[in-house]
Amino acid sequence: MELVLCLFMSFFSITGTSTQDIIIPGQSIKDGETLISAGGSFELGFFSPGSSKNSYVGIWYKKVSAGTVVWVANRETPVSDTSGVLSITSQGILALLNGKNSLVWSSNTSKTAQNPLAQLLESGNLVVKERNDNNLENILWESFDYPCDNFLSGMKLGRNFVTGFERYISSWKSMEDPTPGQYSLRIDSRGYPQLILKKGSEIVFRAGSWNGFYFSGKPGLEQNPTYSYDFVLNNNEVYYKYEHRNSSFVSRYALNPLGSIQRFVWIESKKDWEIFSTAHADQCAIYAFCGAHATCTTNKSPPCACLEGFVPRSTTSRDSTSVDWSDGCIRRTPLACDGKDRFFKHFGLNFPEASHSWANKSMMLNV
């Protein structure tokens, strides 16, 4: 599946010419024309995935891996031919029209623009801003607020508690249809926030909660010379993002139509993407694989075992060869609540399901 994904990204039909990274009111981009970021890292224009005849406005890598699409504007409303035109209004709204001059897709903004322009940044972020204002805090609209199936350096995953606005990535429906598919990677803000993968409304993978350095279920994400990670939780918002410490280093997370989350790294000597990691590469990564009150150990067979003081709930799980532990475990002896009950320490475990927990946000992590 990994090879298929890499190859698939190269078979998009993309053509175009460009000499600039901005458009202003009165200008437009037609099918066959593009914007290129100032340093040449990203390109924006029209493309058709695979053998599809539909046309979409997208952003893809330009300097490396030309054709790897990372963002799609009109992913649910394609243009059926090559008549599409993208422009920006004097109010700062991006508008995609078809050959019949009908609106196919548009951006939005809650702020009134005076002298707007749209610019493709070196990060791959398409922004709408005032022409003479380079303060990124004042951006009127940005594509990074509406991720598709790729999670890029500088993007945020999370939720604004004040407005309810959520940023998350979602898979394509198929390799030739960028319509949102079944899978989404997002921050579950209930209880103590955790990073989860959902198939529809069902959680299928949980990377755990932030422990001060990384998500507890993914210890390979700690700070290093290549990446920096940032997790913010306060009364206004919760979000997670990563940044590349070296601008020459290129990597991305991608969520494919089958629900696989992979980090790709561009290897210049090979002129190809290489899979650096896969989020849920073993059965212990499957959400609730061992059920309640049980642990899952990757290098054991079977991997599931009850915590101390608990026994398998079902008779099937009591079979040492059983692979179905979904019923989990129950207490061997009911709690007496007489002051003699005690807690056991467990080390090296992922934080348990946290959606119904609470957290002391004022505590600091001392190291």
Image (cartoon, rainbow, N blue to C red):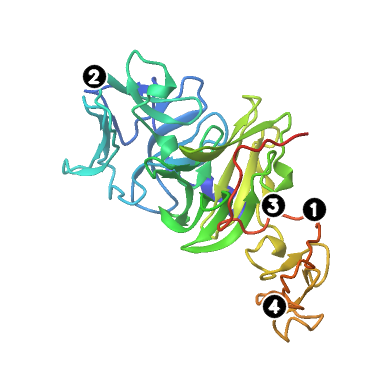
Relative image position of residue 166 (x, y in whole percent): 43, 45
Label drawn at residue 324: 4
Question: Reading the chain from its start, which is encountered first: label 3 or label 2?
Answer: 2
Relative image position of residue 236 (x, y in whole percent): 45, 37
Asked if residue 355 lies left or right of residue 49, the reply is: right
The type of residue carrying mark 1 is: Gly
Residue displayed at 43% across by 42% down:
161
Question: Reading the chain from its start, which is encountered first: label 1 or label 3?
Answer: 3
Identify whether 246 is placed above or below 339. Answer: above
Label drawn at residue 217: 3
In this view of the protein, which residue sits in the foreground, 347 or 286? 347
Number of the front mark, 1 or 2: 1
Q: CA distance from mark 2 to mark 4?
A: 62 Å
Identify whether 249 is placed above or below 134. Answer: below
Q: CA distance from mark 1 to mark 3?
A: 10 Å
Tell me if I can see residue 118 in this picture: yes
The type of residue carrying mark 4 is: Asp
Residue 205's quadrant in the figure?
Answer: bottom right
Q: CA distance from mark 3 to mark 4?
A: 22 Å
Relative image position of residue 260 (x, y in whole percent): 59, 56
Helix, strand or loop under label 2: loop
Disc tally is 4
Q: Residues within 10 Å of mark 2 (few under 14, many from 20)?
A: few
> Mark 2 highlights which residue?
114
> Mark 1 highlights which residue?
348
Helix, strand or loop under label 1: loop
Furthest residue toward front: 338
